[in-house]
């Protein structure tokens, strides 16, 4: 029997499995207080999923507020939409608006790597589409456990194939991301997905359902039993005796990229015809989320006829229909006069479209199932007025010990061993070439990709006439964040900012995906709060706003939380992609190699300490955001005036790794002469540094500019097209063939 | 010259093919899968992607699309037709070209810049290249392994119908390192790599692929464009 509102009123004492659905006693009590009766099964399903950590941000909300508090009007001036919308939107000039967002799909990807990763891509792409933009490119920051662990051989190939399988079939170029290994991710890999899209500024669509009488149309795939997750406890209670045993379907959703591709083209044609009043994608929490968010964002109520929803399984309960996370669905609000035109476009694309509801007077979301009311709620209480927790916060007891255990006592290599160390580090899994991964991704489709992996940033052309485009980079070093979450978050921001500037683009906006352990652990909440503060303060110093983001809690292996991993994505604008700065050297004969910034003895959390000594302790490098900003301005000025022929940011692995990569990517040798302590010069991970190649004719002009603007610089070498080797003065030379084998051989040896 | 570019649901590289036609100073004409109409075009490109999702054998459904009936008819009368990647798979399924494309031998999708040797420069699509020229264009496919029986391979090799051959290590297990072939008449060419992604060094590895589109446009001046507009004539 279907649990109706009438039935709920008649059976106030009926026990409900709210605890199995993740609701606490007081949360359940609050639902009863809101409704002035017990919830129906369908209402319970809606509240439980919408009040989950994932949908309600109940543990993070009080801290995320700090982003808003630190964003000035000046920083906000280019923002067309910000936190709270499906994705942030930025005005990039020439009448173009760009929208971008990062999101996590960590837990499903551990359970079912291929589908988890695939639907992670699908979800973020629909978020971008729901802003009215054409999705243009994706990026995927990924983190795995030990590279040689047996389970990593299951998880990594599956996730990579899922990202590629979905993105390639969808026709979106994959222009970058990260692949990082650390033991803490062994039972909890991180799959973050970024999508960027563009639209004309006047075409921005926000998810509103205003206008009584407007129709609510569900279009795209049918709704099935996949991705129902916890709500299946309700199904077993109501169905076991009547319908017999039903086949259980995986709680991880199953993706169909073809349907999503068609959905994108169909939606864009609908937007172009101007017949969509409001739009919302169906992601986590499915119809529960879409209907309650659309209704609460509008100024009226909403009536939904749930029995009209096209299903792909028989005998689904209202609770299941509302909770299903079947992929590739969108919900639109359409004026009655436009419904016919809407249906015509859907028919052209063979997309199923069904009028499932309408905007009503009043302020209730009423959902009926075969004329019986199964949901009658104030939509804001579902979508926006969930519980908010101020969780206990405690600096971890061992944080002091961790910071006191500096890398200073680690044995450093003798001078004679430094050359070999360059090769060893280049072959270490975190620094090794990620080609094994990225060559499974289409980076060319749509013909707008100007830079992709292994460049510092991905870059796409937005306007084919003017050449205006955007650059994007995502970064985070979880070891730095573990040592000092505040500084670590700033360092993640600094690196993403620097990577964008190193391609000649001006950084303008920030998104993030904050991956942490359990919010019920006060030490994790301390890391979280510190990281949010560091990121927000860093953004204020750089003068660029956070336009959106995502929080993923409960990432842990057993009871051990992952390294705190606030992945930061920075978006940059370039007025003409033709002046982009490539990563590889050797494009012009006789280039000089300059190192911009200062090198200190900074090895806390470094890749050397990690790879050679399996050591994590001390303090991370210092972040100096004023310096990063100056560095960014110099790089953009150098790009504008044609003074820089290549640039590569220094990060994990220091100068040595930057040299290896610029030589191998540019397929040309170099002679370098680092100064001071050679180990520090080559492997320190001091922030705020970029290696640039300048044509000899521009060298004087460029260094004069650096000197005048007080940016420290040092000449560290020259490009040597004849040598086919990386020669380090005083140490000897490494043939490029040998280096390439080391750099590119690691991942195939592990995963082929 | 008007060059039709077919779009099936799931086609991805149609915008790229249209751009390549424009870069070669041709006029790109979108053709929709459900229309039995070639809109009076002078040549057709069947671009890459995953037509109808390709959950079945690649191209197996697309060959039955209404527009393909017109393309086959026109091709058989001499209209220049180019199939790229999924387009090549579709032309093979439609029997405009012999053989079949199978799962890459290492089972992974491969996206890389690929050197190709041009071994036939007398087709409608390769006149611009020097014989045995080597060009660098993207290859991006999961099912690009060219397979055919020995008789067919001997015939292709014997008649010089292998148009492009992979240089260096074989990326997908194609027999005889075959990357692209033509029909006996030389008007229909199919290849797995993507010349339309290599028309500008800004967005591709090189501009080596542009030659294929320029080759087609050259036919206008040469007066050797046979079968022009046949699709629409038949319809009328």
Image: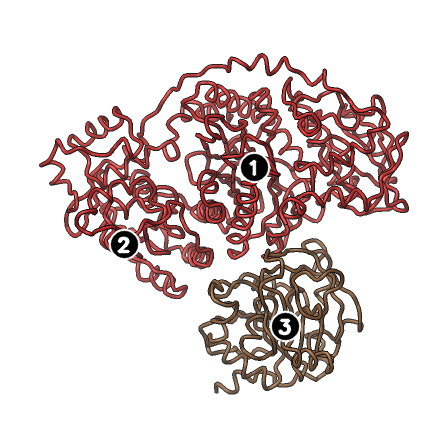
Chain colours: A red, B brown
Tell me which residue sits at (49%, 49%) in the image.
Answer: A114
Counting from the top left corner in percent of width and height, residue A83 is at 45, 34
Residue receiving disc 3? B190
Q: Gap between marks 2 and 3, in whole Å?
A: 43 Å
Residue receiving disc 1? A143
Instruction: Name the element at disc 1.
Output: strand
In the rendered image of this protein, does residue B107 appear above or below residue A641? below
In the rendered image of this protein, does residue A243 appear above or below residue B94? above
Counting from the top left corner in percent of width and height, residue B33 is at 47, 71
Which disc number belongs to residue A332? none
Label 1: few (<14), some (14–19) or many (≥20) C-alpha neighbours in 10 Å: many
Same subunit under labels 1 and 2? yes
Q: Nearer the viewer, residue A315 or A533?
A: A315
User: Which chain is indicated by disc 1?
Assistant: A
Residue receiving disc 2? A309
Q: Are marks 1 and 2 in contact (CB under 8 Å)?
A: no
Q: Gap between marks 3 and 1, in whole Å?
A: 39 Å
When asked about the image quadrant of residue B176, the answer is: bottom right
Counting from the top left corner in percent of width and height, residue A455 is at 68, 43
Counting from the top left corner in percent of width and height, residue B137 is at 70, 61
User: Which chain is indicated by disc 3?
Assistant: B
């Amino acid at each position: 029997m279907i649990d109706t509102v009438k039935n709920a009123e008649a059976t106030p004492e009926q026990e409900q499995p709210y605890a199995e659905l993740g609701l606490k006693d007081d949360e359940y009590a609050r639902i009863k207080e809101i409704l002035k009766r017990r919830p129906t099964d369908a209402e319970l399903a809606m509240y439980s999923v919408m009040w989950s950590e994932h949908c309600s941000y109940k543990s993070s909300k009080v801290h995320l507020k700090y982003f808003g508090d630190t964003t000035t009007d000046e920083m906000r001036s280019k923002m067309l939409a910000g936190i709270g919308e499906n994705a942030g939107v930025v005005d990039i000039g020439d009448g173009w608006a760009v929208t971008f967002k990062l999101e996590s799909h960590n837990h499903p990807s551990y359970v079912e790597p291929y589908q988890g990763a695939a639907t992670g891509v699908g979800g973020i792409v629909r978020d971008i589409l729901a802003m009215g933009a054409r999705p243009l490119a994706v990026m995927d920051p990924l983190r795995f456990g030990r590279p040689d662990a047996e389970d990593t051989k299951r998880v990594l190939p599956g996730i990579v194939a899922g990202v590629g399988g979905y993105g390639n079939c969808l026709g979106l170029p994959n222009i970058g991301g990260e692949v990082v290994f650390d033991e803490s991710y062994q039972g909890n890999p991180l799959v973050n997905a970024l999508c960027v899209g563009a639209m004309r500024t006047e075409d921005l669509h926000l998810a509103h359902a205003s206008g009584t009488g407007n129709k609510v149309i569900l279009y795209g795939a049918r709704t099935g039993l996949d991705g129902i997750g916890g709500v299946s406890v309700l199904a077993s209670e109501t169905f076991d005796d009547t319908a017999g045993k039903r086949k259980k379907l995986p709680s991880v959703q199953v993706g169909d990229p073809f349907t999503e591709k068609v959905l994108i083209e169909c939606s864009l044609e609908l937007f172009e015809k101007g017949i969509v009043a409001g739009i919302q994608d169906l992601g986590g929490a499915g119809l529960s989320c879409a209907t309650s968010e659309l209704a609460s964002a509008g100024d009226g109520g909403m009536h939904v006829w749930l029995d009209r929803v096209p299903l792909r399984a028989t005998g689904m309960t209202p609770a299941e229909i509302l909770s299903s996370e079947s992929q590739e669905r969108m919900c639109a609000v359409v004026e009655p006069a436009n419904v016919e035109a809407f249906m015509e476009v859907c028919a052209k694309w063979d997309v199923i479209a069904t009028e499932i509801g309408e905007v009503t007077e009043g302020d209730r979301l009423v959902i009926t199932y075969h004329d019986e009311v199964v949901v009658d709620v104030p939509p804001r209480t579902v979508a926006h007025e969930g519980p908010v927790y101020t969780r206990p916060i405690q600096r971890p007891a061992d944080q002091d010990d961790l910071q006191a255990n500096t890398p200073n006592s680690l044995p450093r290599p003798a001078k004679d061993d430094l050359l070999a160390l360059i090769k060893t580090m280049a072959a270490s899994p975190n620094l090794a070439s990620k080609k094994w991964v990225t060559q499974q991704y289409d980076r060319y489709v749509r013909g707008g990709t100007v830079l992709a992996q292994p460049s510092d940033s991905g870059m796409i052309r937005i306007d084919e006439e003017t050449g205006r485009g955007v650059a994007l980079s995502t970064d985070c070093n979880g070891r730095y964040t573990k040592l000092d979450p505040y500084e670590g978050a700033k360092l993640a921001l600094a690196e993403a900012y620097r990577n964008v500037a190193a391609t000649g683009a001006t950084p303008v906006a920030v998104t993030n995906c904050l991956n942490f352990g359990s919010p019920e652990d006060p030490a994790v909440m301390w890391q979280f709060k510190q990281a949010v503060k560091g990121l927000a303060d860093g953004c204020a110093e750089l003068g660029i706003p956070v336009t959106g983001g995502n929080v993923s809690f409960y990432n842990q292996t057993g009871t051990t939380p992952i390294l705190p991993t606030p992945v930061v994505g920075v978006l940059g604008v370039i007025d003409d992609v033709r002046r982009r700065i490539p990563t590889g050297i050797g494009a012009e004969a006789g280039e000089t190699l300059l190192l911009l910034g200062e090198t200190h003895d900074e090895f806390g959390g470094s890749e050397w300490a990690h790879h050679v000594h399996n050591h994590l302790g001390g303090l991370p490098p210092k972040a100096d955001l004023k310096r990063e900003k100056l560095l960014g301005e110099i790089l953009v000025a150098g790009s504008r005036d044609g003074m820089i022929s290549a640039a590569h940011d220094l990060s994990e692995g220091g100068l040595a790794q930057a040299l290896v990569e610029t030589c191998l990517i540019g397929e040309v040798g170099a002679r370098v002469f680092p100064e001071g302590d050679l180990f520090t010069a080559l492997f320190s991970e001091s922030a705020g540094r970029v290696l640039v190649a300048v044509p000899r004719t521009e060298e004087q002009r460029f260094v004069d500019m650096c000197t005048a603007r007080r940016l420290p610089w040092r000449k560290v070498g020259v490009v040597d097209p004849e040598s086919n080797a990386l020669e380090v003065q005083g140490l000897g030379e490494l043939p490029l063939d040998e280096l390439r084998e080391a750099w590119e051989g690691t991942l195939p040896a592990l995963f082929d | 010259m008007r060059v039709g570019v077919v779009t099936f649901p799931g086609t991805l590289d149609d915008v790229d093919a249209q751009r390549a036609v424009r870069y070669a100073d041709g006029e790109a004409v979108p053709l929709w899968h459900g229309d039995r109409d070639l809109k009076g075009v002078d040549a057709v490109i069947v671009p890459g992607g995953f037509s109808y999702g390709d959950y079945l054998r690649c191209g197996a459904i697309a060959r039955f699309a209404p527009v393909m009936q017109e393309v086959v008819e026109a091709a058989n009368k001499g209209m220049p037709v180019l199939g790229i990647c999924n387009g090549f798979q579709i032309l093979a399924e439609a029997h405009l070209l012999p053989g079949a494309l199978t799962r890459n031998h290492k089972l992974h999708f491969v996206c890389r810049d690929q050197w190709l040797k041009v071994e036939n420069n007398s087709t409608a699509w390769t006149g611009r290249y020097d014989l045995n020229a080597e060009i660098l264009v993207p290859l991006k496919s999961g099912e690009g392994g060219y397979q055919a029986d020995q008789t067919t391979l001997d015939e292709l090799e014997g008649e010089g119908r292998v148009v492009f051959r992979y240089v260096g290590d074989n990326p997908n297990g194609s027999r005889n390192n075959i990357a692209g072939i033509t029909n006996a008449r030389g008007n229909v060419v199919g290849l797995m790599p993507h010349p339309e992604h290599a028309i500008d060094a800004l967005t591709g590895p090189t501009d080596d692929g542009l030659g294929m589109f320029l080759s087609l446009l050259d036919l206008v001046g040469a007066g050797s464009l046979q079968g022009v507009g046949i699709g629409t004539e038949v319809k009328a």
